[in-house]
Image: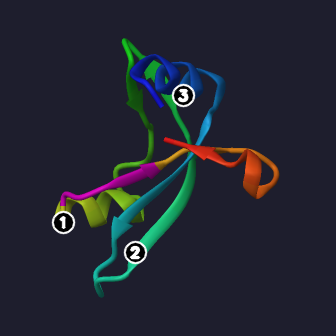
């Protein structure tokens, strides 16, 4: 997708899958709502949540937003 297509795609969605690294090295995945402000993705969570604890220990995060009901419709950013 072009930058404009990504921006439009993210504006239409609201749910993202967020992945951080757990204390034993395994991925910790959670679905979260997100918002956009000036083209940037923002998330809100509790300071003591597992994902925040993971990020304090290993500041790496991955975020996936998907759309589509079947394989031929699947899109993501």
Of 45 and 8, which appears nearest the observer?
8
Q: Residues within 10 Å of mark 2 (few under 14, many from 20)?
A: some
Task: Mark 2 and mark 1 in contact? Answer it, CB < 8 Å.
Answer: no
Q: Nearer the viewer, mark 2 or mark 3?
A: 3
Q: Which residues are magenta?
A: 59-63
Q: Is residue 47 left or right of residue 14?
A: left
Q: Main secondary structure of the magenta part?
A: loop
Q: Earlier in the sequence, mark 2 or mark 1?
A: 2
- Residue at x 36%, y 82% (from the top left corner): 26
* Numbered tag placed on residue 27 in the rendering: 2
Say which element carries label 3: helix
- Residue at x 49%, y 41% (from the top left corner): 77
* Numbered tag placed on residue 58 in the rendering: 1
Say which element carries label 2: strand
Q: Nearer the viewer, mark 1 or mark 3?
A: 3
Residue linked to disc 3? 10
* Residue 16, placed above or below residue 26: above
Q: Earlier in the sequence, mark 1 or mark 3?
A: 3
In 3D space, how far apart are the residues under numbered discs 2 and 1 (Cα atoms)?
Answer: 11 Å
Say which element carries label 1: loop
* Residue 74, placed above or below residue 54: above
Place of residue 15 in the rendered image (x, y in percent of width and height, measured from the top left)? 62, 41
Place of residue 62 in the rendered image (x, y in percent of width and height, measured from the top left)? 36, 55
- Residue at x 58%, y 27% (from the top left corner): 9
Residue at the extreme top of the image, as rendered: 38
Task: Mark 1 and mark 3 in contact? Answer it, CB < 8 Å.
Answer: no
């Amino acid at each position: 997708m072009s930058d404009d297509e990504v921006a439009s795609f993210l504006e239409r969605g609201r749910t993202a899958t967020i992945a951080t690294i757990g204390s034993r090295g395994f991925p910790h995945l959670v679905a979260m709502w997100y918002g956009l402000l000036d083209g940037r993705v923002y998330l809100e969570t509790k300071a003591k949540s597992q994902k925040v604890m993971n990020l304090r220990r290993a500041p790496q995060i991955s975020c996936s937003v998907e759309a589509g009901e079947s394989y031929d419709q699947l899109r993501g950013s």
